[in-house]
């Protein structure tokens, strides 16, 4: 397949290259695009250097375009690319368009049956949440979900990681910490502010978790409330989740469901200090789920903790999995 990666030099773009390698995706030709800032750079793919090109204002010579250069680039170019290619878009540009499937392959692969050459990849926090929530929803029918997130710096791209590293260095050297990407200095801090505040007091990041969870799971009656918090980790989003179910549920029954769930690693042995952690989830395709316990608030309720590498399952891996599905199903 001819593959184009738009935003190849970014935090997600670079992961896409590693995921294409790790999953032995049948890449025939590979084109890499970024902004004029990256002109002349090259990136390694399967042991060879591939030159990064400046994104042209034309359709791209590719069967699949994996786009992660932000919503404004996708809004501007995706319909042009879609004339020649299937576009798998990592941005939020098309996620709420009823004609665009929003897909997590373990949850709603059937949504790929009908599309107009643009497929949306979900917000990273949502993708990680639904990996644990969907199998439990199928078994016990979730009604209300309350999520608090612990989101890493790389959710804000490569510049977010740089700002955290540089700020930490400056903090340790006793200098004032500057910030541009984040609303406040991130080192040794947590920031309950990701994306823009909405009229209802929630941030857009928090609203995305509601909108996208309902669309992916296919249940507009599912109630979801999120508090999204940036923490000073480099990668992996962790989430504390409380779910109220329609049917009776026990931690052991939930563990049994999650043991069978594709893409999930049950890491739940607190006595051995085993639970989901950013450190153990980094670089992993599967999402870790643990700390499963009966809710003290809801009768048919569970509390649990999730950690998933958001550059992978929340972005690059999910996009490549969608491409694999498309390649396997003739249209
Ligand atoms: P560049 O590295 O040349 O700026 P991240 O999410 O990590 O910030 O990465 C964003 C990606 O999107 C980078 O690869 C970046 O390229 C790319 N990008 C940003 N603006 C443009 C643009 N106007 N045209 C093409 N690619 C862009």
Image (cartoon, rainbow, N blue to C red):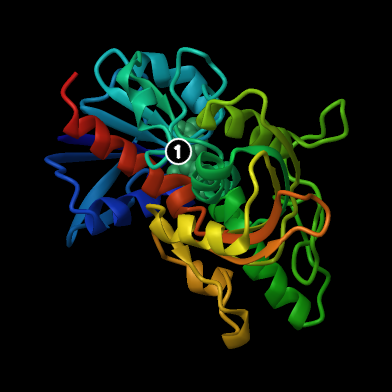
Q: Is residue 165 visible?
A: yes
- Rendered position, 227 above or below 21: above
Instruction: Give the x, y percent position of residue 57.
Output: 37, 19
Q: Quarter of the image containing the N terminus?
A: top left
Q: Which residue is at 56% across, 64% downward?
A: 252
**Most foreground residue, 280 or 78:** 280
Instruction: Give the x, y percent position of residue 149.
Output: 70, 54
On screen, residue 288 versus residue 326, left or right, reads right
Label 1 beta carbon less than 8 Å to ligand 1: yes
- Rendered position, 276 above or below 306: below
Q: Which residue is at 26% across, 35% downward?
A: 325
**Most foreground residue, 56 or 136:** 136
Outermost residue toward the left? 28
Q: Which residue is at 51% across, 44% downward?
A: 139
Instruction: Give the x, y percent position of residue 296.
Output: 81, 59
On screen, residue 268 versus residue 115, left or right, reads right
Q: Which residue is at 71% across, 68% downward?
A: 167
On screen, residue 310 versus residue 201, left or right, reads left
**SS state under label 1:** loop
Other residues around mark 1 within 10 Å, as few (<14) / some (14–19) / many (≥20): many
**Most foreground residue, 260 or 250:** 250
Q: Is residue 35 visible?
A: no
Return the residue at label 1. Answer: 68
């Amino acid at each position: 397949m001819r593959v184009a990666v738009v935003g190849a030099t970014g935090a997600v773009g670079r992961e896409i290259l590693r995921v294409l390698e790790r999953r032995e995706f049948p890449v025939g030709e590979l084109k890499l695009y970024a902004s004029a800032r990256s002109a002349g750079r090259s990136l390694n793919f399967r042991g060879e250097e591939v030159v990064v090109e400046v994104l042209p204002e034309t359709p791209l010579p590719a069967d699949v375009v994996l786009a992660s250069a932000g919503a404004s680039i996708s809004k501007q170019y995706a319909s042009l690319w879609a004339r020649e290619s299937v576009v798998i878009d990592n941005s939020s540009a098309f996620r709420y368009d009823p004609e665009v499937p929003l897909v997590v392959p373990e949850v709603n692969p059937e949504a790929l049956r009908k599309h107009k050459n643009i497929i949306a990849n979900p917000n990273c926090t949502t993708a990680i949440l639904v990996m644990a929530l969907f199998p439990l929803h199928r078994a016990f029918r979730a009604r209300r979900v309350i999520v608090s997130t612990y989101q890493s710096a790389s959710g804000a791209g490569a510049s977010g990681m740089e700002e955290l590293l540089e700020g930490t260095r400056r903090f340790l050297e006793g200098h004032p910490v500057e910030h541009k990407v984040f609303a406040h200095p991130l080192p040794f801090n947590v920031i309950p502010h990701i994306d823009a505040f909405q009229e209802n007091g929630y941030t857009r990041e928090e609203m995305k978790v509601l909108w996208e969870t309902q669309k992916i799971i296919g249940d507009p009656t599912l109630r979801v409330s999120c508090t999204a918090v940036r923490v000073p980790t480099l990668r992996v989003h962790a989430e504390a989740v409380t779910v109220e179910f329609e049917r009776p549920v026990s931690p052991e029954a939930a563990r049994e469901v999650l043991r069978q769930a594709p893409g999930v690693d049950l890491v739940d042995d607190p006595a051995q200090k085993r639970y989901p952690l950013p450190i153990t989830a980094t670089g992993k395709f599967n999402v870790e789920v643990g700390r499963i316990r009966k809710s003290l608030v809801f009768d048919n309720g569970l509390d649990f903790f999730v950690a998933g590498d958001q550059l992978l399952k929340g972005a690059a891996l999910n996009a490549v999995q969608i491409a694999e599905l498309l390649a396997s199903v003739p249209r």
